[in-house]
Amino acid sequence: MQPTRRSYSKSFKAQVIQECAQPGASIASVALNHRLNANLVHKWIRVQMQNSMALQPAFIPVPMQSVAQGSANIIVEIQHPRGTVKVNWPTESAAACAALLRDLLR
């Protein structure tokens, strides 16, 4: 006789993932507290990350004001899960600014 697989509700998975995200929390200890295999919890976290990335748009239009060439800076503030990214860059090197932002937001 084969053992049956356990299944877990979406709300339970979300609760476990949220506990893992707490400062100082260990995925292994959270898994142990819930009598789960840590690899299973890692999988749940990976799947949630993939799902949340799929929901994010690939391009976000940013409204810009018209300014006289060479007289202002590019100023961008972007909310990111790891914190706010603020950039103040000279307009003369806009391509370098774009490259920096691409690297930072990967």
Image: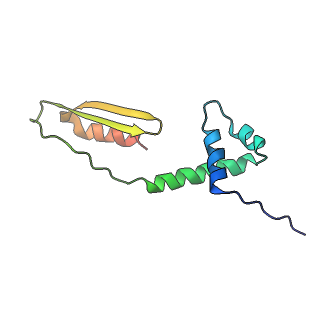
* Residue 11, position as x, y percentages in the image: 63, 52
Which of the image's four quarters has the C terminus?
top left
Can the viewer see residue 52 in this picture?
Answer: yes
Could you tell me which residue is drawn at 70 percent across and 51 percent down? 40
Q: Nearer the viewer, residue 43 or 12?
A: 12
Q: Is residue 72 above or below residue 52?
A: above
Q: Is residue 39 above or below residue 24?
A: below
Could you tell me which residue is drawn at 59 percent across and 54 percent down? 47
Q: Is residue 66 above or below residue 72?
A: below
- In the image, farthest residue toward the left: 68
Q: Nearer the viewer, residue 16 or 91?
A: 16
Can the viewer see residue 104 in this picture?
Answer: no
Q: Is residue 88 above or below residue 63?
A: above
Which of the image's four quarters has the N terminus?
bottom right
* Residue 49, position as x, y percentages in the image: 54, 50
| Quarter where residue 10 is shown | bottom right
Q: Would residue 18 appear left or right of 79 to someone viewing this image?
A: right
Could you tell me which residue is drawn at 39 percent across and 40 percent down? 103
Numbered disc total: 0
| Quarter where residue 78 is shown | top left
- In the image, farthest residue toward the bottom: 1
Q: Nearer the viewer, residue 51 or 92?
A: 51
- In the image, farthest residue toward the right: 1
* Residue 66, position as x, y percentages in the image: 12, 40
* Residue 27, position as x, y percentages in the image: 68, 40
